[in-house]
Each structure stands twice: as C-alpha cells, then as structure tokens.
Amino acid sequence: RSSSVKSQQVKQVLVPRRGYGSESVPERKVAILGAAGGIGQPLALLMKLNPLVSNLALYDIANTPGVAADVSHINTRSQVAGYMSEEQLGQALEGSDIVIIPAGVPRKPGMTRDDLFNINAGIVKSLSAAIAKYCPNAIVNMISNPVNSTVPIAAEIFKKAGTFNEKKLFGVTTLDVVRAKTFYSGKAEVPVEEVNVPVVGGHAGITILPLFSQATPKANLRDEDIKYLTKRTQDGGTEVVEAKAGKGSATLSMAYAGAIFADACLKGLNGVPDVVECSFVQSSVTELPFFASKVRLGKEGVEEVLGLGPLSEFEKEGLELLKPELKASIEKGIKFANES
Ligand code: NAI
C-alpha cells in the first residue's frame, strides 16, 4: 500500500546558477514532518520554490497525498513526494539533508507555549527517534513548540541513539527575528529590507531577547520605544493567537521564517560563505546548555556559535531575567526524554 505521490518531473541536476560560479547546484533532499498543517502547507510551497532543493518529502499523519499532489504541479526544480502514516516515515526521511519539523498542536488563546508540552513532546520524541534511525546525519530544524524544550528532547533522543551531532540540531527562532525586524523598521522609520536585529535567548515570552541596541540601520530610539518593541517581539506569537481567536497560531509568517532558515542551512551545506542566522542551539555563550544567538552556518551545520556582543543595561537585565525560565524549560525537556 502506498499513498506516495511522485511528480512526473524529470530530475534536473543543473539549475540556474545563483552565485555558484561555474559549479552546478548539488542535489539536496528536504523533508517536512507535519507538512499538511497550518505551517506545513505554506512551508511546503516555499520550499518547492527554492532552487537549492532537488527532492521535497512531505510527511504527515493525515492529508499529505493531496498537499503533495498539489505542490508537485509547480514547475520548479524539486521532485515532490507525499508520505502518510508511520510506515512511510522511514522512506520520507531516508537521504534527507534537512528535516524540518512543524508537527504538533498550536496554541489557542490563553495558552502558553509550555501548555503544548504534553502533546508535542511525545510527537517530537517519536519523530526524533525516526530521524536517528533513517537519516542520522541530517540537519534538523525544530519548529514544534515549546522549542525551548523540544530541542533538548531531540538532543537527548539522538544521544541515546548515539547519533547526536550538536552542529546539526537547530531550534527555529527566525520568526522572532522576522518580527523584530518588522517592528523596528516601523518605529525607526528605516527601510525594512535593510534592517538587521539579533534575537537571542530562547523562543517563549521573556526568553525571547531582541538586541535592539545592535539593530541596523542605527536609529536614536527612546528607552520607552525599545521597551515597547521588546515586549511586542516577545508577545508577537500571542498577538497572532488572539487575532486568530482559537483557529491556531502563526502559520504564514512562520512558514516564511522557516523557509528563510532552511534556505540558510542549504546555503551553508553548499559552501556559501558567511551565512549567519540566529538559532537555538547547543551553546557555551552562557552557562545554559542551549541558547539562541547568531550562528554561522557551514557544510557541517553550525560552523561557529557567535557571542552576544555588547549589551545595553536593559538587555543585560533581560538576559538575567530569562535565564531561570529558559533553564527550567531545557531541564523539563531533558527529563521528559529520559523518563518516558
Ligand atoms: P497544525 O495543527 O495546523 O499542524 C500540525 C500538523 O502536524 C498537522 O497537520 C498534524 O496532522 C501534524 N502532526 C501531528 N502529529 C504528527 C506526527 N506524529 N507526525 C507528523 N505530523 C504530525 O499546527 P501549526 O499551526 O502548523 O503549528 C505546528 C507547530 O509549530 C506547533 O507546535 C506550533 O506551536 C509551532 N509553532 C512554532 C513557531 C516557531 O516560531 N518556532 C511559530 C508558530 C508555531
């Protein structure tokens, strides 16, 4: 029995050259787990548009054949296949260079990301075990919340399987950066496409610490503006959850952010120099074992975890405030992975 849907496209090895000189673009397989969901569908679309992808595997426990058939008709490079049910998970994962995980339940109004823990922790655990079995060398982009705990869960499962590579496990915090850039550009009245803002810490509430003191282009914002922007970035997810009024959390902006991050990982794998994105990774930047900061991406995943740079007094305070919460979320993940 197979509900796998393969497109009839002929495999293209050579695609338009984008900054690769005379070299061809290598074959790269990307798998999306949770591909039929609110994030999964637009993310599948955006990855189908990425010329660096040669194979796109779409896996979900429901509805993947339709999504895969639909996306596969788009006339871009990648071959698309849909996989449904656990017995096809191995096939979906085999040979993957990058596995993106937006599987799980999203928040409803009044919920914190941690309220998702009980359901999503189990999903992430079983998907991580499958990754360890079928594509232990793949780069993992973890979107499922609470990221502050799901990344440590995946790390523990990989350690148990003997496949853990700290350079290849990423919590996707790009949406925090996307939001910080948008909100900063509005306040500072600078062109949004020129804006850069590092966001460090974790991915929930006060653990999200945007470093507006390092934002470029520079703007002389008042302290109260910085406070407002910080809070709005930290509460960006809740803003969307409330606006959707029970119909889920950010999906479209998250798919965009997920596509940006996966593209950065692909560029790193392909040897493009100086690819830097913020991500929640194993880290020695602080005393916490996992922390989000700027990361240089390379052929093996993390090439270098960059430091925090100079912080304002407000940011230093925020950093100390977030540590206990982030530490507890990390420990909760580790405990779950080892107990259940
Ligand atoms: P959704 O409910 O629309 O989609 C989730 C999909 O996962 C569904 O299609 C479901 O069938 C699938 N799924 C459930 N169990 C699965 C399993 N064992 N294997 C494969 N697929 C499975 O949810 P949505 O809105 O797409 O959100 C997904 C996750 O992303 C949530 O945990 C949410 O909190 C998180 N998220 C993370 C963000 C971030 O910045 N990292 C931002 C927004 C959401």
Image (cartoon, grey):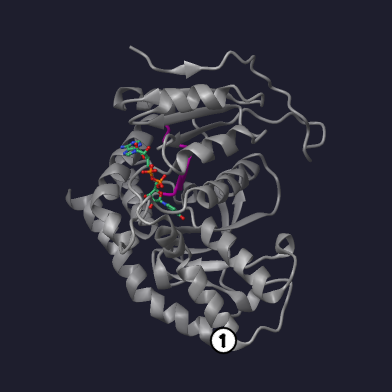
Residue at image point 31% right, 64% down: 110
Q: Which residues are magenta?
A: 135-143
Residue sitting farthest toward the right: 22
Residue 131 lies in the magenta stretch: no
Identify which residue is drawn at 57% across, 45% down. Answer: 259
Q: Considering only vertical position in the picture, is 106 above or below 193?
A: above
Q: Is residue 226 above or below residue 254?
A: below
Where is residue 214? Give x, y as percent.
65, 75
Q: Tell me, yes or no, if residue 243 can be seen here.
A: yes
x and y percentages locating residue 168 in the rendered image:
48, 46
Q: Helix or strand or loop: what does disc 1 sit on? A: helix
Quadrant location of residue 134?
Answer: top left
User: On screen, 201 above or below 66?
Assistant: below
Name the residue nearer the viewer: 315 or 160.
315
Q: Which residue is mark 1?
A: 224
Quick one: quadrant of the N terminus? Answer: top left
Relative to the observer, which residue lies in front, 209 or 253?
Answer: 253
Q: Is residue 179 left or right of residue 151?
A: right
Residue 138: in magenta span: yes
